[in-house]
Amino acid sequence: MKPFAYVRAGSVEEATDAFAARPGARYLGGGTNLVDLMKLGVETPAALIDVTRLPLDGVEELPDGGLRVGATVRNSDLAAHPVVRDRYPALSQALLAGASGQLRNAATTGGNLLQRTRCPYFQDVTKPCNKREPGTGCGALEGVHRDHAVLGHSERCIATHPSDMAVALAALDARVELRGPEGARSVPAADFHRLPGTRPEKDTEIHPGELITSVLLPAATGGLPSRYRKARDRASYAFALASVAAVLHCGNGVVERVGLAFGGLAHRPWRARRAEDALIGAAPTAAAFEHAVDLELAAAEPLRDNAYKVPLARRLALDVLGRLAPAAQL
Amino acid sequence: MDSHDRTATTGHAQPDTTDTTLRVNGKPHTLAVDHRRVLLDLLREDLGLTGAKKGCDHGQCGACTVLVDGRRVNSCLLLAVTLDGAEVTTVEGLAGDGEDLHPLQRAFLDRDAFQCGYCTPGQLCSALGVLAEAAAGHPSHVTDPATPSGAPVPLTREEIRERLSGNLCRCGAYPRIADAVEDVM
Amino acid sequence: MTGTETVLGAATERREGREKVTGTARYAAEYTGPGRAHARPVPAAVARGRVTGVDAAPALALPGVLAVLTHENAPRLAQPDDPVLAVLQGPEVPHRGWPVALVVAETPEAARAGAAAVRVTCAAEPHDVTLTAGHPGSYVPEEANGGHPAVRERGDQDAAFAASEVRIDTEYRVPPLHNHPMEPHASTARWKGDRLTVRTSSQGTNAVRATLAQLFEVPEEGISVTAEHVGGGFGSKGTPRPDVVLAALAARHTGRTVTVAFPRRLLPSLVGHRAPTLHRLRLGAGRDGRLTCLGHEVATHTSRIKEFVEQAAVPARVMYAAPHSRTAHRVVRLDVPTPSWMRAPGEAPGMYALESAMDELATELGLDPVELRVRNEPAEEPDSGRPFSSRHLVECLREGARRFGWADRDPRPRSRAEGPLLVGTGVAAATYPVLVAPSTASAWALPDGGFVVRINATDIGTGARTVLAQVAADALGVPTERVRTEVGSSALPAASLAGGSSGTASWGWAVHEACVRLAERLATLPGPVPEDGIGAHADTTGEADAGSAYARHAFGAHFAEVTVDTVTGEVRARRLLGVYAAGRILNARTARSQFVGGMTMGLGMALTEDSHVDPAFGDFAESDLASYHVPAHADAVGIEAHWVAEEDAHLNPMGSKGIGEIGIVGTAAAIGNAVHHATGVRFRELPLTPDRVLTGLLAHETPAGTFGG
């Protein structure tokens, strides 16, 4: 770990100013991934701007029925929040399916979104990785890649995004609210993370110096039946081999609203728009779900050693949608 | 607030430090903390409190678990400089000043809830965190979603196992650890 | 024996327990005296080649960095017996991760930064790290690990197999596995002149001391090595490891007290691993279920610098009566880290394969798998023809079946479902040899009525302090509380290592003898015990290592109940039951913990622990605890261990067999067999992770090969 300056920010403006003033700065949230990567030499910030004491640790119920979650709300607190548990159960479930109790106590909402891939080649500075060091190649292509992407990958990068939480946010039509030198803006959670393309070093659509201030959960998905499920190598404390978040609402016997997102399959939480389009207006039957999910997964391009992810994701999605369907019709 | 930089941010003299005050097991300590120093190394190297263990140094094993402001965390991933004003409890602080062990420590002995002992301090601190979290109504991955929000979550055997899963034990003392936690509920 | 079950066999509380639950127990890296420096190795980034240059300047320019040792400036060592210890002695890189420099610094942070700053250039050579069954470089070694002949043949295996009514010809694969004790390997060293003081995390410090004396060419008497508390080893600390050599090198080079604590990520390359094994089993049997032949052939890998051959075909020489047999090992030298001991080397992977094949045979015959094993119970050890000193496998199977409720089992595969879960049960046998080694011990009587037993045993979590006090108290005829034990230091009477499930037998034997002699002295003592106490010494050389006319092994039976999620392919063990016949159990409490611990590691071997030698880069792809999945709390459900009473007069004065390893031995096969029972699909490669299981379920559901899911 290289020596670095430390700045504790007292306000959002202080944080963004400090960031702008220090080349090579990084915002520090719970640190559960950033400090890990600094120890590995993957991240070498010249300065850390500590944002954990910013007044962004609240969960606010909005007049329109939505929910604004501050960026520094800890994952465990968010998972336990009564409104989240009641109205956005998939989010609570996703958070609780991730990491460990200790990590969830430290990790923040913003930091969870900005965590980086656990691809072993990315984490090992002695190996090629286009994400860590553009132009060096992708070690995972020829190496061990059972855990890697089957959707949306490029020859530059086959890494997956590790977050459980972000998958639920994508399905729930959440928005990521940002503040930066150019002011405030928000981005749909489903579009916040990128596909690797030719620039895998860029994980998200965040601009340099921008700070995540909050996540907005819309009223539209609040209170609808939603669910998260992941498959993993051990019963707890493991990253997803594949996961699914879904929210489903039916009326008059047909699907009126659906959000479906996959985790563990791609460089970003994979919002299954094709499947959703196929479902809207269709009766929520097993056959319709199968048709829709197969449409989505037809785009999958498995690698040498991860073809299992396609049927795994398919079965997870059918299971989750099938379990949501009865409640969704109430 | 800018840091108290002893030197410029780069260069070859001394690493950047900031004076940081923490209370550890009730005692205040003020140290010029190397920004790179994590709480685990501060405890072990600066304070000689080697109860918290370095099993992986990356938040993957839980052996370094301590309580910060009453919440269990991986001390290997917490930069000490960020903890100014924090209250830290380590395994050394569980029993208090007397000879009496904390009931959970006693239960670990009674149940033979360890072998090599290296994960034990983390298991103890983590279990104390679990008891507090469940009492405060925090759900877990295995909590029935129908459980009312805010109500204390009953710690079934399955709940204990799930909630302690961030604490690896290679000796396989898991069943005995769960027994010990049940003993103090 | 003079004592009673209230002493030997009692569930006595662990003596060091209070230190461990209060955090005061100190491990090797925790001697934080003033002036202590920290050293961190720089691993080679090529799988094979030579170091052509080390630029230490960027590291030395960092604050707090004291020195950078390389093969060019490190103190010279004598040639070690174990090539993995020849660190920083030459430019050759035998595998990725090999230490090519060592950075010594004032703080762990500075050492880390320094290690990242050292610029090492290597001339890489083409590498080969992939084990295949027919690897052209493979050969038949003279011996497998443990001194076992690589090949044993009885009768005519091939002809008998060809003539058998029922044949099972099948292959299994066990991946590389990693010990990963919770305490990473660590050593703290300090020189004063030619005197060396070392704290190390080791399973036996006499070997560490002898090795350091030989390497540094100083007398053993000038070296003190202690291992007061050891955070697990499971074989990986059974021999001196590079951490202790590096610490001593750095301490000599800098004149400081130096701690080397290996980063977790370096463990897979630096402290040994269980080598991957490819198994071919050929079982022939009559319709009555009696084996006519048993063939077990194993292919495995070793490194370029050392031959270590996982003796996985050896248990087949012990288990079942079969008139014809061939058991053989082949090994290939690859550019991989050097494999070594991991809990039940040989037996763990070998019995997975053999006991899976036995299950396949039972299925083929339509015979209950417990009954199949009972039918093939041998009258004497098949390979040697020697009588067993004791063998109660059948009793374990019967007792296990009773406790588990085996009689209620519907033997048909895929006959039980609970919603999306398929449920199955399985059984497997286990065996582990009785190993024992010479040790020395002294016993002292003190005027206050107390006793002290001194022996360089190592407590790696087994409870050695406690059980040796029980052995001593039993021999002396006094309450256990009156006996203090001193262990874990090379200043104490020399003793064998905590490995091979031999520790308690070996140390206990010496302690028992010393105490018997002391009791004799006390019996003839005319007056009170003098102020300095009186003592007695014992050395079991010649006794403990004397050959036996008997085949001596522990046995056990494992039962497992699993669920297989048809949505995800996730397998969870719902119940694990082990019943063991391991001689006399000396401490019911700590013994149970060891059995359960072994079973938990077996659970990991079966379901979660997977490792790959990276074909492109040559190291293990799963190098940390986030990617190498040892079982977590949530995986450890319903694990129970029991034992049957076993008297055996041909072992040691306590009548005990080792218990540290047998718990892992049959667990993976029992789980695998349960998964077959649950699903009707036979998986032959470990671990049974969702990728494999789901793929297998799909192939089973859609045999045409369509992959719709």
Image (cartoon, grey):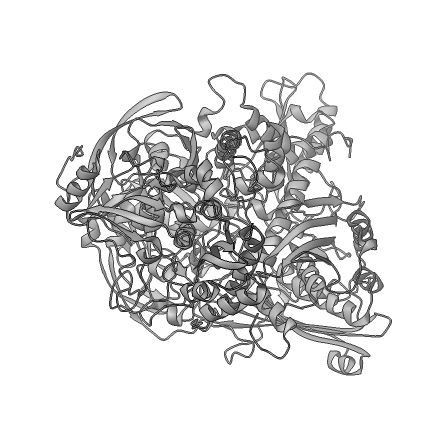
Say if C11 sits above or below A177 in the image: above
Is residue A305 shown above or below C494?
Answer: below
Quarter of the rendering containing residue C378: bottom right
x, y percentage for residue B164? 53, 40
Residue C88 showing in the rendered view: no
Q: Position of residue A121 (x, y in %)?
A: 36, 62
Q: Is residue C92 above or below residue C194?
A: below
Left/right placement of residue C58 relative to residue C90 reads left
Residue A302 seen from this side: yes
Q: How many marks?
A: 0
Residue C641 position in % (x across, y down)? 71, 45
Location of residue C412 by image quarter: bottom right
Farthest residue toward the right? C288
Asked where in the image residue B33 lies, by quadrant, the reply is: top left
Q: Residue C309 appears at what percent x and percent y?
A: 56, 66
Up the image or down, C399 lies above or below C330; here it is: above
Q: Along the line of sight, which residue is nearer the eye, B115 or A315? A: A315
The residue closer to the viewer here, C48 or C670, is C670
* Residue at (62, 21) in percent of width and height: C446
Give left or right: position of C562 versus C618.
right
From the viewer's side, name the closer residue of C372 and A174. A174
